Image (cartoon, rainbow, N blue to C red):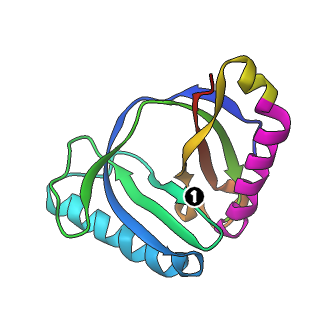
Amino acid sequence: MIDDPKIVETESQMAAVIHLTMPRAKILGRIPPAIEELVKVIQEQGQTVAGPMFTHSLTCSTEQFDLQVGFLVDVPVSQSGRVKPGELLATRVARTVYHGGYEGLAGARSEFGRRMQKEWVRELAQEGLEAGLGFWNSYVAGPEAGDDPSGRGTELSMRLVDGT
């Protein structure tokens, strides 16, 4: 389901984002309109999408999502409606890739979290690291990759912070 996690240093990347707070049950109805709005605003400003769509979870609870939906861009966007300039910060993350359709993504996130707690917690502590707030998914190969969900790929990234 997921690849073996790796520790990766990310670079700062500019993005166009929409911030959403919603009950978990509403996510499938709120994300697609946000994607359409982002693409429309990016194009209206004479830009093109420079990387995969992502969701960046700011906080997570069993009842609600508090997240940003975004696309990477080469030039900062101007605020327009709900679309604002944003960025994915340069940081150290634990990263894995989930292979499969959207319906298995929640299970992949849970598996990733369990593996980090079970297999990586000691290794991270030895390096003075621990899991921090901030989790994002980058949809590197979505439905455009074909009808077979096994050809789809979603990078799951968990921010790591100084644990000392």
In the figure, residue 150 lies in which quadrant? bottom right
Does the magenta segment cover residue 48? no
Q: Amino acid at mark 1?
A: Ala
Front in this rendered view, residue 145 or 89? 89
* Furthest residue in direction top, as rendered: 127
Q: Nearer the viewer, residue 39 or 62?
A: 62
Q: Label 1 belongs to which residue?
A: 145
Residue density around tag 1, few if under 14, some if 14–19, many if 20 or more, within 10 Å: few
Instruction: Using residue 101 as the reference point, say whether residue 28 is left or right of it.
Output: left
Q: Does 21 appear above or below 1? A: below
Q: Is residue 46 above or below residue 14?
A: below
In the rendered structure, the answer to whether residue 69 lies left or right of residue 59 reads left
Q: Nearer the viewer, residue 64 or 3?
A: 64
Q: Residue furthest front?
A: 164
Relative side of 7 to 10, left or right: right
Q: Main secondary structure of the magenta part?
A: helix
Q: Picture coordinates of residue 102 (x, y %)?
A: 64, 66
Q: Quadrant of the C terminus?
A: top right
Q: Position of residue 31 (x, y in %)?
A: 45, 72
Q: In this picture, is 26 found above or below 2? A: below
| Residue extending farthest right | 118
Mark 1: which secondary structure? helix
109 part of magenta stretch: yes
Residue 137 x %, y %: 55, 51
Q: Residue at x 34, y 71 (%)?
A: 36
Figure check: 4 above or below 82: above
* Number of numbered markers: 1
Range covered by the magenta-colored residues = 102-121
Instruction: Name the residue rendered at 30%, 48% in the picture.
Output: 86
Q: Which residue is found at the position 40% from the left and 46% from the top? A: 51
Q: Quadrant of residue 40?
A: bottom left
User: Foreground residue, 63 or 140?
Assistant: 63
